[in-house]
Image: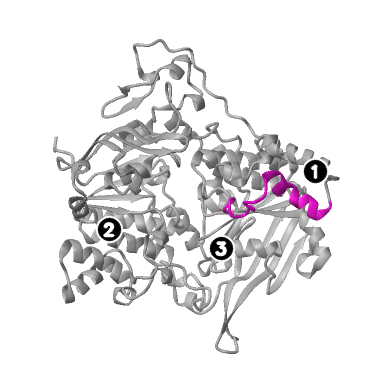
């Protein structure tokens, strides 16, 4: 067998903290061969990114010497190189795409200057040769008009464009190994599909190896050759992609799969992993996953498991596969069924008619209106009691603006928002304030939506106090205790501050805050987008339990199709301020009619990709809502566009019972 390009042996990285020594990477070993894609998979905080930074020797100054083990690149130990020699490796033989392109790119340098830095240092290019190579790189990563883009700054580019620039910087040195740290986390599924397709194409052209760091099982399924699963600083399972997805071996890996939302699981609660990843400052005894493992027994808490073979080419760190020790009788967990009889009463709670939100663009000394941003441009929706309506679409299509305008957090330019028959757009002052107790919102980022100087109890009680409900202070505190228990937290948590909680716990606090005023409608704005799959499962289970118990209605804003398939009753698909298709979840996901909807669904990576998905080519980014295209807004990107699509916007047409679409294909 050929020598591996990268060989990592017993890599250990630690930080000295006030709580003690934190071993963020603890004795991990793996190999990556040329042309191979290798994935590090696991929850946030398990040490994936720290493994990559240790390989690159990009740790903070105080931790630079806190690495042991070996990192062999073509047999040369990178940990033994002097810093000057390591600089010749970074960006040249090993390059890295960081997780957040906006914070990784220098905002005061143009795109061209940032790519040129690599070419000057590692390739010695200058003058006309440098300019030609810069344009070649931007064209290679699919950025149109490369000469113009080279003179632009990062803030002038979309999220997908920024990520492509990061890839161009990484490719400039023609690396042997590319480390991609969550390269598509902040991207829409359509842009994600473009970026992943680009990486595959470039890898086939150059033969480079890729170390992919992710928590997305769908991305792993479609991109990688081999998988390593990390938990609490340790790799606990390694296997080939096909074997891993056919039958994961470690209980942690199995739980990650069981926690995935899916259409087939709508009748039951998702399987969850109790608790959270333990702090890496503690001294571990036994298996690190044992406190959260449903298959653990006494030995798991006493002795650390060793690496054991679990089939050809795969190994696992788990006592279940040690034939030398007796195993207790184990029974599987029974799924918790849901009573779906609550679903809906048929009574309409919310009806939106021709809603528009246009933001004026003011220019010049006198700030005269020179145009408008057509954020929401004529939307019709209806939502019944106890129902979940999912609102899906790419970033910038107007989903969040629509949700806020329904709640009157943004005043609509035109249209009606009828809540229980009353038009909210006509309410002002005290009348609107009293009505707000009936509808609440869960924001995308729970931490930024809470006052960091207020204790959790005061945050939850604030709405009750503002609405004059819940009785006196003692009664409100009792209600806070009840709400905390209802969302799976403890009453004593009311005396803590937001920074003392994990991301999933903060989202539970935000849910408790919305429930405090007994609402009938909750707008959920991407409430699980920043969460790991295990924490996401806990939040989705909580939302379903609350809906069943309280007959709540949800307007669920998301771009995660798997969450839609599990949670939603109906789906509305938005594109550039307008709803282009809506109907029951089964009809939209199973028989989508609009080309944009089909493109969205085709771009979603499949966890079990045994059957190749039918790709719908969707190029470019959505047009600007300041200057929407004439005719159908989607026609510049539509593979089925015709002459009429460029001339007039299509009328809404019914293609099946409750299933509506705006597309000239159904004229």
The quarter of the rendered structure image containing the C terminus is bottom right
* Residue 610 is at least partly visible in this image: no
Callout in the foreground (1, 3) = 1
Q: Circle 3 is placed at which residue position?
A: 574
Q: Is residue 638 above or below residue 361?
A: above
Q: CA distance from mark 1 to mark 3?
A: 40 Å
Residue 515: % across, % down: 72, 46
Q: Is 621 part of what is drawn in magenta?
A: no
Callout in the foreground (1, 2) = 1
Q: Are marks 1 and 2 in contact (CB under 8 Å)?
A: no
Q: Is residue 466 above or below residue 273?
A: below
* Residue 588 is at least partly visible in this image: yes
Q: Circle 1 is placed at which residue position?
A: 476
The answer to whether residue 602 is left or right of residue 405 is: left
Region in magenta: 444-468
* Residue drawn where x is 45% and y is 27% of the image: 289
Say which element carries label 1: helix
Q: Is residue 428 above or below residue 525?
A: below
* Residue drawn where x is 39% and y is 27% of the image: 249
The answer to whether residue 134 is left or right of residue 584 is: left
Q: Which mark is residue 170?
A: 2
Camera-side residue of 492 and 366? 492
Please tell me how crowded label 2 is: few (under 14), some (14-19), or many (20+) other residues with Cα within 10 Å.
many
* Residue drawn where x is 39% and y is 47% of the image: 219
Residue 273: % across, % down: 52, 32
Q: Quadrant of residue 620?
A: bottom left
Q: Is 464 part of what is drawn in magenta?
A: yes
Q: CA distance from mark 1 to mark 2?
A: 55 Å
Camera-side residue of 66 and 517? 66
């Amino acid at each position: 067998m050929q020598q591996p390009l990268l060989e990592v042996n017993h890599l250990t990285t630690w930080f000295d903290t006030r709580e003690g020594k934190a071993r963020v990477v603890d004795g991990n070993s793996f190999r990556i061969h040329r042309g191979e894609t290798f994935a590090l998979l696991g929850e946030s905080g398990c040490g994936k990114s720290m493994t990559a930074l240790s390989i690159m020797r990009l740790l903070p100054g105080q931790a630079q010497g806190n690495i042991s083990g070996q990192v062999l690149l073509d047999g040369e130990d990178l940990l033994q190189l002097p810093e000057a020699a390591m600089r010749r490796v970074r960006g040249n033989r090993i390059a890295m795409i960081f997780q957040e392109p906006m914070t990784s790119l220098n905002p005061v340098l143009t795109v061209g200057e940032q790519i040129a830095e690599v070419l000057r240092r590692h390739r010695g290019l200058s003058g006309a040769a440098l300019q030609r190579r810069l344009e070649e790189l931007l064209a290679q990563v699919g950025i149109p008009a490369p000469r113009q883009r080279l003179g632009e700054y990062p803030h002038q580019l979309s999220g997908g464009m920024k990520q492509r620039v990061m890839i161009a910087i990484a490719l400039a040195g023609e690396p042997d190994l590319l480390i991609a740290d969550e390269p598509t986390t902040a991207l829409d599924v359509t842009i994600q599909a473009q970026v992943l397709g680009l990486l595959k194409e470039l890898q086939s052209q150059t033969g480079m190896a890729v170390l992919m760091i992710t928590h997305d099982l769908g991305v792993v399924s479609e991109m990688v050759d081999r998988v390593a699963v990390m938990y609490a600083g340790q790799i606990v399972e390694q296997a080939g992609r096909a074997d891993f997805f056919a039958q994961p071996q470690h209980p942690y890996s199995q739980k990650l799969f069981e926690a995935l939302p899916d259409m087939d699981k709508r009748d039951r609660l998702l399987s969850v992993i109790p608790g959270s990843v333990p702090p890496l400052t503690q001294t571990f005894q036994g298996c690190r996953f044992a406190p959260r493992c449903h298959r653990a027994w006494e030995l798991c808490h006493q002795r650390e498991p060793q690496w054991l073979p679990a089939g050809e080419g795969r190994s696992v760190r788990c006592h279940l596969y040690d034939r030398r020790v007796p195993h207790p009788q184990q029974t599987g967990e029974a799924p918790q069924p849901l009573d779906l009889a609550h679903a809906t009463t048929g009574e309409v709670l919310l009806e939106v008619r021709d809603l528009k939100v246009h933001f004026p663009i003011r220019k010049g000394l006198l700030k005269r209106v020179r145009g408008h941003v057509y954020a929401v441009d004529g939307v019709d929706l209806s939502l019944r009691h106890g129902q979940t309506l999912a609102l899906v679409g790419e970033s910038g299509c107007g989903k969040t603006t629509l949700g806020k305008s329904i709640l009157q957090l943004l005043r609509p330019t035109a249209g009606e928002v009828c809540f229980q028959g009353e038009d909210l757009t006509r309410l002002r002052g005290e009348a609107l304030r009293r009505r707000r107790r009936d509808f609440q919102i869960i924001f995308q980022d729970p931490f930024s939506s809470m006052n960091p100087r207020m204790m959790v109890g005061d945050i939850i009680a604030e709405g009750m106090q503002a609405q004059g409900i819940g009785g006196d202070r003692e009664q409100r505190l009792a209600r806070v205790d009840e709400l905390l228990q209802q969302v799976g937290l403890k009453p004593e948590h009311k005396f803590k501050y937001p920074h003392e909680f994990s991301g999933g716990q903060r989202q539970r606090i935000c849910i408790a805050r919305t429930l405090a005023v007994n609402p009938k409608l909750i707008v959920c704005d991407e409430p699980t987008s920043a969460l790991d799959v295990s924490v996401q499962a806990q939040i989705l289970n909580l939302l379903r339990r609350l809906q069943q118990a309280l007959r709540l209605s949800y307007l669920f804003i998301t771009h995660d199709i798997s969450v839609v398939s599990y949670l939603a009753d109906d789906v509305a698909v938005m594109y550039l301020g307008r709803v282009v298709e809506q109907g029951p979840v089964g009809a939209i996901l199973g028989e989508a009619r609009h080309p944009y909807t089909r493109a969205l669904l085709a771009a979603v990576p499949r966890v079990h990709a045994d059957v190749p998905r039918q790709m719908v080519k969707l190029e470019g980014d959505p047009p600007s809502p300041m200057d929407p295209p004439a005719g159908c807004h989607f026609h510049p990107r539509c593979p089925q566009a015709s002459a009429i699509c460029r001339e007039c916007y299509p009328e809404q047409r019914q293609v099946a019972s409750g299933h509506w679409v705006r597309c000239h294909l159904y004229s």
